[in-house]
Amino acid sequence: MLCQQSINIPQQLGQQAPPCGITGAWLDALGVEELPKTTDELYDLLVRFRDEDPNGNGKADEIPLVDVKMNSTRRWLLAAFGMKEWGGIEEVEGKVRYAPVTENYKEYLTYMNKLYAEKLLDPETFSQADEQKKAKGQQNRLGLFPDWFSFFTTGQTEEEAMNNPMFHPLTSEVSPEIVLPGNPGISRGAFAITSNNDHPEASMRWIDYLYSQEGRDFFDQGPEGYLWEEGEDGQRVFKEVPEEFESSEDYRGTLTPAYGITTPMLVDLVENAPRSEFDLFIEEETKAKVDPYAETAYPLVYLTEEEQEEINTIEVDLESYVEQMEAKFITGVEPLTNWDKYIETIENMNIDRYVEIYQDAYDRWAKN
């Protein structure tokens, strides 16, 4: 297998939850020509995945929808019910709200509980690790699944993966217009300089270099001789991947930290690097299904030191409780008839003050 340029994560998504892919061979087997555009259409497709043996092995072993603790598909499915954020704050027409206490969120939980009860959502969603999810993908048992690139889960070649379309944003009865969470275009926390750094000027020169085109290319693909070498025409030529690695991305991850984490570098294409058919496929899918709709849930504001202390105090218990209750509501351990009790518990966690702080910060940001 040849190494190739590292595939760029869609800029609108940035380091947020990865997009979801659909197993194209299953769509072909079922004669599906159009992807679901609504939650009802998605439900119908998942039922067909469960019942009509799309992997063709004669066994009822298909898993229509998979995730690991809902950490990836959550963001995409929340959007179908009109929400751009889950564990935090979002802004809607200038007003800040905490999504997990809205009626929209209750509709999301109701939908997900239905999928779980009908075995359309993997029963191991809240107990498995990512490695287990990938193992199921390599057994051709997954219909709809999240990953930055579908071959990470399926183990397919990039050519085969081009048959796996990106999930199309959904609408629902409570959200008839497409809503999709987007990236603000700036990632904080890419680097830090502490008081123990004896040479901050040198550190900043290094960071400045990483934000240049040359530095970005180096940080992304390493020095010549590993992933690539220079061809006669000055263009990069990608080398064979060592046999012990399953893909060029796995190999690249051993050469650079710019692999699945926020790093100080430009979001740009590597100069003088050929672009594969898979690169172009991802670009077209993103232009069609992400770029027209993506919106930032809440701007990158700055809190005062006092505000941040209050937020930190409230947030720890709040996030833990909401995450636990999501799993309980979806699996049916906690019936949705206890929704009012759930809301009351969150109100007792000082949620009004939590929202007020973010509203004040948003108002300062909007004013300036």
Image (cartoon, rainbow, N blue to C red):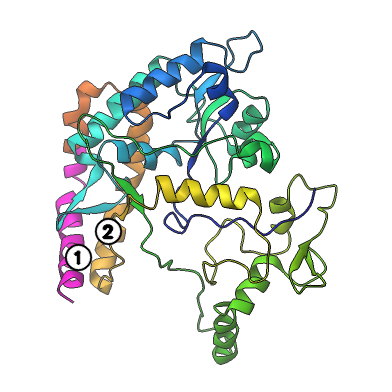
10 Å crowding of disc 1: few (<14), some (14-19), many (20+): many
Query: Which residue is at a point 62% across and 32% down the rendered structure image?
Result: 132
In this figure, which residue is indicated by the disc labeled 2? 298
Determine whether, in the image, residue 224 is placed left or right of residue 276. Answer: right
Query: Which residue is at a point 56% across and 31% down the rendered structure image?
Result: 128
* Placement of 363 over or under 127, stated as above or below: below
Query: Which residue is at a point 14% across and 73% down the rendered structure image?
Result: 367
The numbered mark, 1 or 2, whose residue comes first in the sequence reads 2
* Visible residue check, residue 69: yes
Q: Secondary structure at mark 1?
A: helix
The outermost residue toward the front is: 233
Query: Which residue is at a point 51% across and 80% down the rendered structure image?
Result: 193
Tell me whether circle 1 and circle 2 mark residues in contact (CB < 8 Å). Answer: yes
- Amino acid at dot 1: Tyr
Given residues 166 and 198, the one toward you in this image is: 166
Question: Main SS of the magenta segment?
Answer: helix
In this figure, which residue is indicated by the disc labeled 1? 362
* Placement of 118 over or under 249, stated as above or below: above
Given residues 40 and 298, the one toward you in this image is: 40
The outermost residue toward the top is: 58
* Visible residue check, residue 333: no
Quarter of the view holding residue 158:
top right
Is residue 334 found inside the magenta-colored segment of the image?
A: no
For residue 347, the mark is: none
Given residues 59 and 132, the one toward you in this image is: 59
Determine whether, in the image, residue 1 is placed left or right of residue 168. Answer: right
Residue 112, image x, y percentages: 35, 26
Residue 304, image x, y percentages: 25, 73
The segment highlighted magenta reads: 345-368
The outermost residue toward the right is: 243
Is residue 363 found inside the magenta-colored segment of the image?
A: yes
